[in-house]
Image (spheres, rainbow, N blue to C red):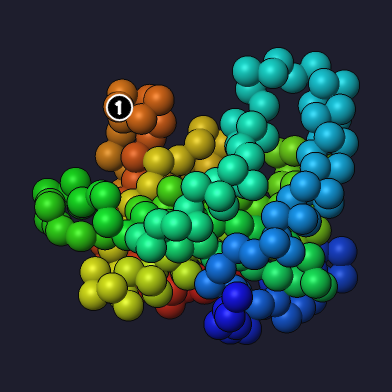
Amino acid sequence: MTVDVSTAYLLDVAQDKLVEAQVWDAITDQQINDWETLWAKATAEGMVRLADAGIPRGKWPQSLRWNWQKKAQASQAVLFKPGFCVMCQDQTQGLMYLDLARYRARLPSQYGKHLVYVDFVESAPWNRADLLGGVKYRGVGSILLRAAIEMSRAENFGGRIGLHALPQSEEWYRTKCGMTDLDLDPGKQNLRYFEMTAQQADAFVAKGYSK
């Protein structure tokens, strides 16, 4: 499979310096292999940490249940659900699937307009303080959100994106990303729904968040 590669930068927290990363517009066998091996091992360690800390399973990150192999298989034959990944040090640092066709904007100012919906997005376990208590690389989430914005622009959607946030990510989308909180959505497991306008997308890209 041919993939387009563009350069981005992550913050190596331990060394406090920027390191080069790549954004691929595909999720390949390499990423699924990383998920099945590297991610699985780190996730298991994180689950032990959460259990030892006495955190109830109901409060564990919900994305721990996601199966990226099944998501890849379900999306391979669907042209309107492209995948993206962030690579650094030849390891998969983040994964994302978008939906370009099934969703429309809900905000009154852009109601009914096309947008790019972020279907699934996840950072590698070692980049998640809510799982392992520390972070190896910062910037994965911002890079993937920027990729969603650029896809929206490429589709002539103006940078508009939407997503349902897992509870542990709500504050990041609201305050760091500047997205509009449209409240809980009973039709989507009562997850909180967020949208980003073209103007908010421009502001997010201009600020260049590092997380």
Question: What residue is shown at x 50% (from left), y 47% (from top)?
Answer: 74
| Vertical placement of residue 115 versus 18, above or below | above
| Vertical placement of residue 71 versus 62, above or below | below
Question: What residue is shown at x 80% (from left), y 42% (from top)?
Answer: 40
16 left or right of 202 in image: right
15 left or right of 103 in image: right
Quadrant of the image occupied by residue 206: bottom left
Q: Amino acid at mark 1?
A: Gly
| Vertical placement of residue 115 versus 74, above or below | below
Quadrant of the image occupied by residue 89: bottom right
Where residue 180 appears, as percent x and y from the top left, is 31, 49
Where residue 139 appears, as percent x and y from the top left, is 63, 65
Quadrant of the image occupied by residue 149: bottom left
Name the secondary structure under disc 1: helix
Where residue 165 appears, as percent x and y from the top left, is 45, 40
Question: What residue is shown at x 45% (from left), y 63% (from top)?
Answer: 82
Mark 1 neighbour class, 10 Å CA radius: few under 14, some 14 to 19, many 20 or more: few
Nearest the eye: 67 or 86: 67
Q: Exactly how many numbered labels are in the figure?
A: 1
Residue that carries the numbered disc 1 in the rendered image: 187
Nearest the eye: 75 or 140: 75
Nearest the eye: 20 or 176: 20
| Vertical placement of residue 208 versus 179, above or below | below
Question: What residue is shown at x 59% (from left), y 43% (from top)?
Answer: 70
